Amino acid sequence: MQKPTAHLRRRFYLMKIDHLGIATKGIDDALKFWADALGLENVHTEVVEDQKVRVAMLPIGESRIELLEPTSDDSPISKFLEKRGGGIHHVAVAVEDIEAALAGLKAKGMRLIDESPRIGAEGCLVAFVHPSSANGVLLELVQSIKT
Ligand code: CO
């Protein structure tokens, strides 16, 4: 018999947890834990203008830790830091077809922050699902650009 979630996985083209986004006041300071103490390697740092953040990507197994630092006071990360003082900001799931995943969620009445994908870190297509539809979790869908 098929596992009960198998058909969902097919429909939404879920692949894996792509990364966990962690809000920090400063990436350099956060790296003292994630890189220096824990031993992860920071393989990629970039500013994502659209989201007003600087990100650092640290692979861990098949997944990554994404450290986020605000680049301006009106960054969503600044607001998060003010309210919560840092911590897990979002969970990102890799999907094969982000348009199909968004259409599927919308059809089920889920609240989307992004109705259509935008460009995120590393040139990926990303879209956020509102925490009110995901038990308080800000969910990011990520589709990597195939090269
Ligand atoms: Co992210």
Image (cartoon, helix red, strand yellow):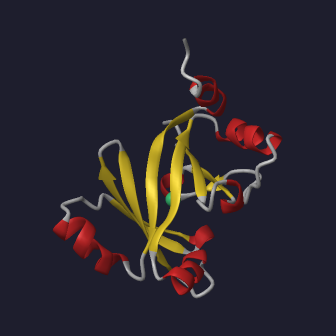
In this rendering, position of residue 110 left or right of residue 51: right
Q: Residue furthest top?
A: 1
The answer to whether residue 83 is above or below residue 56 is below
Which picture quadrant has residue 30?
A: bottom left
In this rendering, position of residue 106 left or right of residue 11: right
Residue 43 x/y as whole percent? 30, 57
Q: Closest to the observer: 23 or 42?
A: 23
Q: Residue at x 52, y 73 (%)?
A: 53
Q: Residue at x 65, y 41 (%)?
A: 98
Question: The N terminus is located in which quarter?
Answer: top right
Which picture quadrant has residue 6?
A: top right
Q: Residue at x 77, y 40 (%)?
A: 103
The answer to whether residue 14 is above or below residue 42 is above
Q: Residue at x 63, y 84 (%)?
A: 74
The answer to whether residue 57 is above or below residue 103 is below
Residue 79 x/y as whole percent? 59, 82
In this rendering, position of residue 101 left or right of residue 77: right
Residue 127 x/y as whole percent? 65, 53
Q: Closest to the observer: 31 or 139?
A: 139
How many labels, in total? 0
Residue 67 x/y as whole percent? 40, 67
